[in-house]
Amino acid sequence: MKTAYPSLGAVVGDGGVRFRLWAPGASRAEVILHGSGEAAMRAEPGGYFQAAVPGAAAGARYRYRVDGTLIPDPASRCQPEGVHGPSQIVDPRAYRWHDAAWAGLPLESLVLYELHVGTFTPQGTFAGARERLPYLRDLGVTAIELMPVSDFPGRWNWGYDPAALFAPARVYGAPDDLRDLVDAAHGAGLAVILDVVYNHFGPDGAYAVAAAPVFLSSRHRTPWGPAVTLDGEASDAVRAFFVENALHWLREYHLDGLRLDATHALVDDSPRHFLAELAGVVCAHGGRPRLLIAEDNRNLDRLVRPPEEGGYGLDAVWSDDYHHQVRVVLTGERGGYFVDFTPATADLAAVIRRGWLYAGRPSRYFGGPRGTDPDGIPAMRFVHFIQNHDQIANRPSGDRLSAAVAPSTYRAVSALLLCAPQTPLLFMGQEWAASSPFLYFTDHAGELGRQVSRGRRLELAAMPGFAGTAPDPQEPETFGRSRLRWAEPAAEPHAGMLRCYRDLLAWRRRLSGLDADAASPVDGAVVLRRGMYRILVALRGGLSLPCPEDAAVVWHSEDPAYTARPDPPVRDGGVLRFGGPAAAIVEGAG
């Protein structure tokens, strides 16, 4: 029998609080209210325990005692003393929202801006991010994508070591501070997408596993160890836990969608895959539309095909192929997962036409066929990017693409990304070619911290083409160096790059809804067709691209507003000649 949402954790009602815990295998459980005594929890079918405590109220702190062992609530809404401390009762109904008129954003309007709350601003908080919302609105993005905010051990973390999955990280602020951020974003016309991690638990503070070891599968494994139990015995309760977590973020924080981390590691042999179940619940929950976006390296079309076509019904999927192809074209790198890609711009044009490149052909890196046919999937369902948190931090020095290519090349490839029909994702600071790296950082205690440092060195040493000495993720300086430097956008050459991005995002709005195609008429160039416009992108110099004499060049990336040393394309009869890398938008080309 299904239980009404919310079913887990401390739920505030009239005159008291109802506590509910899943601890299969336990013989008894009590809820311990700090300063207010304790209450025995009644055992229920399926391994659940429940207690109603009259007089309990929001703000009180509590723990569970399970067979004599004290633990925080695995579904805690707040961990004010850290993931190992007591939980705090939160009443989400007490927050006064101002976004009743917010209707959400359709997928076709999304321009995603990925950010890490702890390094996005000097404050490293939800309140600090809220202060930057006018900047993001004026930039022209339409949605911020928060890297995971679930509470984690230590003072800083990427968020992919999830411990308290329902509690916003106390170092970023209180639950209402996150609500303030979302509420203000909606007021500014920005959607908010949250990255959630359902494929593994972190190595420290994951009390859901302590209360229910069956969260971890005895049948399947992933790169992080045992897979989460999504099929077989006990899987119904595990699946319900994660579905409730998704609804928690969407309902209690008014989020506009979720980005699902590493869905290729959600191992599930059930007749109905967990992702299909999750998509069905989110679609049916009512209210404005909410989006589900997968990160998945398998190029599986069923992720985004509708249920009536045998798909899971997710809204979009990240396409690593685009990033990898761009990187190889621009830098010639061929190590690690880049081994499957070529420096040919014909392949880059193919990724734009199809969404991804690998659709069933053999992959050297994966050791077998990779991908499925994306035919018929709308372009907007593919998320394309030239960098993201993983692709920067996978490099030992955490260097960005803008550090590896000339500014003219960076402007040109940025135009290609933002003028193409796929859903683009920017990583924080990309728009001004930020000089700060983005490194992998953690703050684990004791031996676990030392193991993480050793593991990071071994991981990078095993990745051909990524050799180098990486900063120790446990060093505070590693975290500090990853903070954005907000003086840069006002100073050249960063200010010129920012002007370029703002103009490109304005052009993207103008191109929206126009039909699209991509080709590579000569190696080193890609030409996009968008209705009456052609976007000519030369990723190296010395190229000539067709441009009818009656067509007008209405924008180019070598404008003096963007660079102190412009090298604009030159019209020569029926062609544009590119002395160096550049992009141009041509209106009226046949």
Image: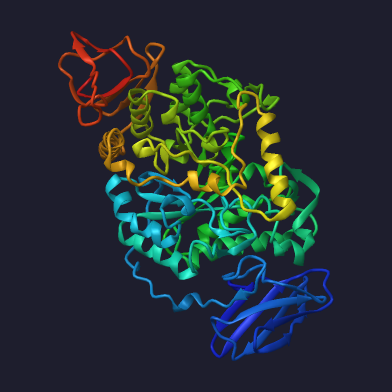
Q: Residue at x 44, y 26 (%)?
A: 353
Is 216 positioned to the left or the right of 125 in the image? right
Q: Tally the marks.
A: 0
At a point 49% along the width and 29% down the height, the residue shown is: 322
Q: Examine the rendered structure and indicate whether residue 94 appears above or below residue 332.
A: below
x and y, in percent, of residue 554 in the image: 19, 27
Residue 533 image position (x, y, % from top left): 25, 27
Indicate the colouring scheme.
rainbow
Q: Quadrant of residue 302?
A: top right
Residue 360 visible in image: no
- Give x and y (percent) for residue 82: 61, 66
How far across and how far down the image is residue 585, in percent? 25, 25
**In this picture, residue 260 sits left or right of residue 219:** left
> 241 or 341: which is nearer to us?
341
Q: Nearer the viewer, residue 117 or 55?
A: 117
Which residue is farthest left? 550
**Which quadrant does the N terminus fall into?**
bottom right
* Residue 59 in view of the camera: yes
Q: Quadrant of the C terminus?
A: top left
Q: Along the line of sight, which residue is nearer the eye, 458 or 251?
A: 458
Quarter of the image holding residue 369? top right
Residue visible at 71% across and 40% down in the picture:
454
**Is 72 placed above or below 406 here?**
below
Name the one closer to the observer, 452 or 583: 452
